[in-house]
């Protein structure tokens, strides 16, 4: 997985020394609407996502994200412990029905593009890219076939989502599951839950 990132190149020099290029990550304001999300570098959606219908309307619990917002969870979903190395880029992990897994990251640098998948061989798979929109909020999902170079992956069907909430927050989501249908259902559910997020 790789995120497209712009970089700013500057030079530094001292008396009698050659100029040395320094690479600094560019910083730009993040998108706060679905229209802004669509302008970021990344695979172009081919059409609207298939939606399996909203999850149960009754939330059984909620989790607090590090940015102080709360995410409602419905039956079958629960928070998982963060993994070693998650600190600084992954804010929450969830386990869902059919052993699906979701990681959640808050993004704040508009110089970053949307995530895409690279197979272990270095091949860039085309994937299936679609969108969901609800007012000024919405999401863009890219779903992929299993990597042939990782035949023993327990959850080989992967989807990358970039989502803007009604409050204007930008999140990056990764879904992995055993089947394509389970992946798409998990993506549909987590999208619906985030689009309920008002604070």
Image (cartoon, rainbow, N blue to C red):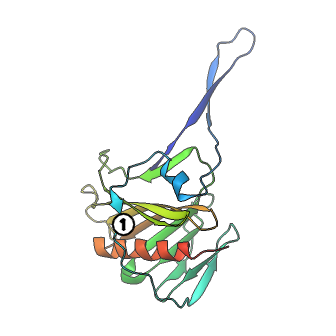
From the image, tell me which residue sits under label 1: 49
* Whole-percent x, y for residue 119 in the image: 32, 51
Left or right of 199? Residue 185 is left
* Nearer to the camera, 168 or 69: 168
Say whether residue 44 is visible: yes
Residue 185 placement (x, y as % from top left): 37, 76
On the question of residue 1 being in view, the answer is no
Q: For the point 37% across and 55% down, which residue is it?
A: 45
| Above or below 84: residue 115 | above
Q: Which residue lies furthest to the right in this view?
A: 15
Dividing the picture into quadrants, the one containing residue 50 is bottom left
Q: Residue at x 62, y 38 (%)?
A: 26
Label 1, residues with CA under 10 Å away: few <14, some 14-19, many ≥20: many
User: Residue 97: percent from the left, percent from the top?
Assistant: 40, 83
Please identify the quadrant where the C terminus is shown.
bottom right
Q: Classify 188 as above or below 30.
A: below
**Which of 167 and 41 lies nearest the eye of the viewer?**
167
Q: In which quarter of the image is residue 96?
A: bottom left
1 vs 86, nearest the viewer: 1
Q: Give coordinates of residue 102: x percent, y percent.
A: 47, 70
Left or right, 39 with respect to 69, comes to left
Q: Residue furthest front?
A: 135
**Vertical position of residue 196 compared to residue 20: above or below:** below
Q: How many marks?
A: 1
* Circle 1 SS class: loop
């Amino acid at each position: 997985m790789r995120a497209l990132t712009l970089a700013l190149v500057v030079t530094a020099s001292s008396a009698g020394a050659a100029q040395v290029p320094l690479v600094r990550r560019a910083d730009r304001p993040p998108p706060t609407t679905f229209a802004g999300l669509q302008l970021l570098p990344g695979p172009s959606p081919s059409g609207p996502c298939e939606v399996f219908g909203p999850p149960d309307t009754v939330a059984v619990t909620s989790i607090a994200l590090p940015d102080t917002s709360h995410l409602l969870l419905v039956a079958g979903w629960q928070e998982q412990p963060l993994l070693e190395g998650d600190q600084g880029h992954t804010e929450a992990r969830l386990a869902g029905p059919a052993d699906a897994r979701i990681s959640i990251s808050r993004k704040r640098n508009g110089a970053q593009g949307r995530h895409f998948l690279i197979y272990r061989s270095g091949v860039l798979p085309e994937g299936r890219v679609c969108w969901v929109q609800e007012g000024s909020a919405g999401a863009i999902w890219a779903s992929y076939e299993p990597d042939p170079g990782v035949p023993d992956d327990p959850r080989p069907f992967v989807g990358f989502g970039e989502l803007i909430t009604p409050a204007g927050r930008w999140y990056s989501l990764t879904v992995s599951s055993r089947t394509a249908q389970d992946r798409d259902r998990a993506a549909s559910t987590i999208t619906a839950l985030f689009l309920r997020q008002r604070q």
